[in-house]
Image (cartoon, rainbow, N blue to C red):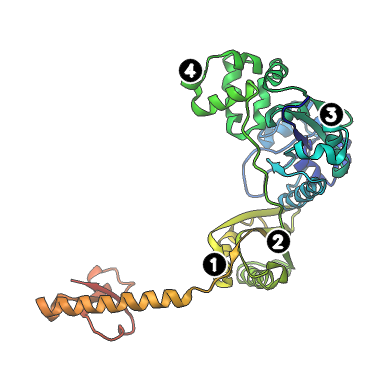
Amino acid sequence: MFVSAIVAVLLPRFELSVGAGGSATLLRGPAALAPMPGTTQGIGEVSAAAEAFGVRPGMPMGEALARCPQLTLVPPDPAGVAEAWEEALARLEGIGAAVAPGHPGQVCFDAGGLRGLHGGGVRGVVAAAGRALRRPARLGAGPGAFCALAAAARARVVRPVIVDGGRERAREWLAPLEVALLRMREPVAPLVEPLERLGIATLGELAALSRDAVADRFGRPGLHAHDLARGRDEPLRPRRPLELLRESLELPEAASGPQLEHALGLLVDRLLARRERRGRTLRAVALSAILVEGGTWRERVTFREALADPRRMRLALAQRLALLPAPAEALRLSVESFGPPVTDQRPLLDEADAVRDRRLREAVRQTRALAGADAALRVVDVDPGSRVPERRSILAPFEDGPPAAGGSGRGGR
């Protein structure tokens, strides 16, 4: 009898299989995800055949090719990964699951409310998730998310692993497993290497340590890892279902500079004009491109405040175009999350500016009445490009009317 039922789904080598065009391509020989163009970082995910040669993710490309000369480097496809991952999450949401995704290829959801819907208890929910994905996946279930992820890591595509019972049962099941499973959780992943150096090879050995010793050596991340090894985990935080809203534009050959900025402006205008936006602001968007040399590029942009102003959006996104690692043949812009509906508060801002202006002029008038006409001066820019500081600007009497052309309007004494 399940006290809690968390189902975990692992899609092995998800980013590599998307970049290679499918899992079947990885069976032809050793392959690895190449670094992004223009960067010196190590390789990404590697196939099982490449692992047999000692190639590991994060390894420098030169070392990987030295170990496996026949290694095939697959261009990264972050835009394709995002689309394929969103499609997989939408399929799971189609069976009623409130998904809490991790990195692409890893997701958990609570099966508590789905047992009666799909029949067969938790095993019925696991089977329904496997059918919905329509692709090879490893599935596991357990009392907590980490236990479910560990079960999925031990599972096979045709044989899910289900851990029955509560927290104590989870601790017993996790005890003989390798401590390297902590890499599936980003906050505690850096602890794997120091734990192994200290001779702690299994989660049971980690759980047997005192919390004071773990906290003294590893701090808060160590306490979190200690809880995971003991079967304790944080509750899931399901995401809100994403509304897909995207615009794309084919670019002329060797488009760059002003042409890219003009294309970006067209995408912003088209996206804001879509009827599906329903007057809402945009909190976060994703700017992506299909590269001429192969592969894709993707950059997620979160605005400091929700926007619906095309001019401000272009200013925020134009800076990201400089990050393109290679010429692009297509540019895409999609919505990541929406903000509240648009409210026009410009009259309030204009009124506040008018009040502030009246108060400033009254303060200047009183100051000049008490201390003389030269008590309030303003800075006038004369030659901003001069190398002599005294020639860049001068002080002039403050006037009640609007500042003269070229003046900055800054009051000074």
Q: Alpha-carbon distance for marks 3 and 2? A: 42 Å
The residue at the far bottom in this view is: 401
Type of amino acid at the residue the image marks with label 2: Ala
Q: Residue at x 54, y 69 (%)?
A: 312
User: Height in image: 376 above or below 77?
Assistant: below
Q: CA distance from mark 1 to mark 2?
A: 20 Å
Residue wearing tag 4: 212
Disc 4 packing (10 Å; few <14; some 14–19; many ≥20): few
Q: Earlier in the sequence, mark 1 or mark 3?
A: 3
**Residue of label 3:** 160
Single out the mark in the foreground, 3 or 2.
3
Q: Residues within 10 Å of mark 2 (few under 14, many from 20)?
A: many
Marks 4/2: CA–CA distance: 54 Å
Location of residue 111 (image quadrant): top right
Asked if disc 4 and disc 2 are in contact, CB closer than 8 Å, the reply is: no
In the image, taking residue 318 as reference, residue 241 lies left or right, namely right
Q: Give the mark nearer the N terminus: 4 vs 2.
A: 4
Q: Dot 3: few (<14), some (14–19), or many (≥20) neighbours within 10 Å?
A: many
Residue located beneath label 2 in the image = 328
With respect to residue 55, does 387 lie above or below? below
Residue occupying the point 70% across, 21% down: 170
In the rendered image, the quadrant that contains the C terminus is bottom left
Q: Is 349 in front, or is 324?
A: 349
- Residue type at mark 1 is Leu
- Of badges 4 and 2, nearer the viewer stands 4
Percent x, y of residue 398: 22, 80
The image's mark for residue 315 is 1
Q: Amino acid at mark 3?
A: Pro
**Residue 297 located left or right of residue 413:** right
